[in-house]
Amino acid sequence: MDWGILEREPELARLASAAREAADGAGSVVLVSGEAGIGKSSLVRALPGHLPAGTRILVGECDDLATRRPLGPFRDLIGSVGGELAGAVREGGDRHRVHEALLEELRGAVLVVEDVHWADEASLDALRFLVRRTERLPTLLVLTYRDDELSREHPLRQLLGQVSRAPRVHRLPLARLSLDAVRTLSAGRVDPAQVYAVTNGNPFFVAEIVAAGGTGKVPPTVVDAVLARLRGLPGAIVDALEQLAVVPSAVERPLVDALLTDGAAAVLAAPERGGPPTGGVAVLAAAEQRGLLTVTPERVAFRHELIRRAVADSLPAARRIGLNRAVLTALVARPGSDAARIVHHAAQAGDQDAIARYGPDAAKDASATGAHREAAAQLRLVLRERHRYAPAELADLLERYAVESYTIADSAAAVAAQREAVALRRALGDTLALGADLRWLSRIHWWAGNADQAQEAAREAVTVLEHARDDRLLALAVSNTAQLRMLSERYAEAVEHGERAIALARKADDPAILAHALNNVGTARWRSGDPGGREQLEESLDVALAAGEVEHACRSYANIIWTLLDNLRYDEADTFLPPAMELADRAEHLGFLNYLHVELAMRRLAAADWGDAERHAEYGMHDFVPARCPALTVLARVRIRCGRPGAEVLLAEAWDIAVGTKELQRTGPVAVARAEWAWLRGDAAAVVAAAGPVHAQASRLPGAPYRSELGYWLTKAGHPVPPDDSDHPYALQARGQWRRAAALWRAAGCPYEHAVALAESPDPADKLEALAVLDTLGAEPAARILRAELRRLGVRHIPRGPLAATRDNPAGLTDRQLQVIRLLAEGLTNAEIAARLVVSVRTIDNHVRAVLDKLDAPGRRQAALRAAELGLLPADPPS
């Protein structure tokens, strides 16, 4: 009996069905998840017997190496795939070649990647590439992972988020075995109730304890259960198992030959030889018969990773070190061994010479494949032995480590390493290298939110390179200065430096630096009120796209979108967001992709789509300061406007970050959010404290955003401000022109701001209309204040608003869907709902379909009745 596939018939049937659909051209992704030992690998092993005849299955595994093998699961496919993919994976540096080869190879195939929670960054990139295209391919992509090992920051989270948006996704969370299944496995040999109580139905634990003995002999832990199976085995078998156990992956035939030198590899040969097995054959055969190993012509592996870990973890340290040294010796002797594997075993064996020798190459391989986390980890190991390198070589390694750390948003490590590299370059007297490293140090300081240090390093970079006769490096340093001036709202200086950088970049014929400089000048001009800056900023985008400079194109997109959002030109921002996110996603430029998600969160906040705003803001909740600060601000404003707790902590962190940047684009939005929160709490003094200083700063700048909104809040708090004669709707509200402001907010597509402006009307009818919108949006604090105003005006029959139960939302509706069902229950058509929420009718059509589906309602009337039963609708007004 195959214990691993008990009670897995539904999952195997779904996999078989998905494979048939893929063969017909409807590719899909299957996520097989569960805890360690739940049977994911067993399900994969059982899969071939349930697929259509002739189905091609490729299986790759991710390994629990200290630093992952770049493209590890795809390296496992070598020997089973064509030469183009094998060559692309072996070389690894051309990511696009790997991706295109995968596309070609997987047509009509089932690809299984096991243990993707251990995947290296390059493999995750490749999987993201495949996920985006699976629906158009006759391919089934099966990913297995441990869902109980995923922290919020785990690299796999982003891939899973992308999979969730794919058109065809099958989720197969594997459940533990029932008591009946445990009873079947026990087969009268042990007490099934006791086994079930000890294992809670985990299939691996059950199998190991049953195999270890009967009632009264059950070891207290599963590790003991595994070790119990080794007791009584001949020493040669135990030695072989211990040697294989320190290799955290399947062990390929040449490595088995090298490690088990007494002929063990013979077991991998054709089985038709007569006579009893001897030597290594007996070793592996006996271990296989005990259910500890699986043996194929290509490799040997433990039947389950937990068996390998149990054996490895039981070893005394001295024994483990010796076994790793044996693996290290074998790998070094084999031409073409993965440098990452060599470094892993060198670290486990304490061989610092090997780490110093092979670590830089391992890092280079990882970086070339886009596995930047792995590259940083390799360099971190290498730099523990920095005394082994000459100063110039050490400076190169430190610079590489700083850049890799910058790429993965480890700002502290990046700053420390780059500072050390600069110190070495200074001591060496290498002018060009020093100037280049200072420019990098400036960028890394800005990334970390340290404005003063960024400016200081930028100034020195230009000084060092001014007479070095390298136009390219000088152009980049000057453009970097222009960028910092632009970000700190010193627009005239930004234009001056930027125009010099443009001239130098054209002289050096460097389109990347030209795009960078055009971006800085265009953004500075546009944000200072010169509409001609937009044309220059869009030129920077065109130059970057034509040159294939993805990072510079993404930065151009980001600055265009941010400025459009600041100017309330949301429809135009909507035209730039999709191609920008597609570019960043396609190129796997995750830093800018996350930043663009935050910009989309800002856009959804303006549309009062609270749930969507929060979902996109979550992409920015990491250590990348430029994205984290606005992400925190969006999340806080959603909580403020919906009356949910948690805004205070979010705003406190956002303000600390913003102050460190010394940039109005950071301090402005946070100050606005703090002022709005204070007003909704009825604290006028806190409004003034939050808005006053930043408003004073904004008022000194031409065309500065946030000035009008901060001035509006100060006016409401009774604090005098200089006249703002602009046509910004907040400026109009501050001047008492609420009707014009409300019309502008409606035209911009901002239902919350429209309702707040309408509520400033002296007419109770306008206030009641505003109240209905605020109730629909779930904007409880503003609605509560408006109800109090209506009562003071003597208005009777004021709607009570949504019940408290609405906030619990038992139907699982998003905030926007909750808004839609309330309006639907009022009898509004889709077009009328779209007008109320200031969105397109097509968008409302999609929301209505989703609401009907979640409420399990065949029609609108039934959906309204179901929503009322669940307490999702406002209570009837008192009579």
Image (spheres, rainbow, N blue to C red):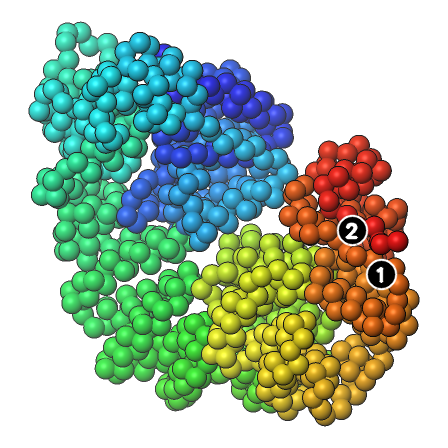
Nearest to the observer: residue 795 or residue 635: 795
* Mark 2 vs mark 1, CA separation in Å: 12 Å
Q: Is residue 159 above or below residue 425?
A: above
Residue located 53% across and 41% down the image:
130
Query: Counting residues from the N terminus, which is met first, the one under dot 2 or under dot 1?
Result: 1
Q: Position of residue 540 (x, y in %)?
A: 61, 72
Left or right of 703? Residue 32 is left
Inspect the image, locate mark 1, and give the three-letter code of the amino acid beneath it: Ile
Inspect the image, locate mark 2, and give the three-letter code of the amino acid beneath it: Pro
Left or right of 821? Residue 229 is left
Circle 1 SS class: loop
Nearest to the observer: residue 21 or residue 413: 413
Left or right of 670? Residue 384 is left
- Which label belongs to residue 874? 2
Nearest to the observer: residue 704 or residue 419: 704
On the question of residue 71 being in view, the answer is: no
- Residue behind mark 1: 798
Residue located 15% across and 17% down the image:
282
Circle 2 SS class: loop
Residue located 47% across and 61% down the image:
622
Q: Residues within 10 Å of mark 2 (few under 14, many from 20)?
A: some
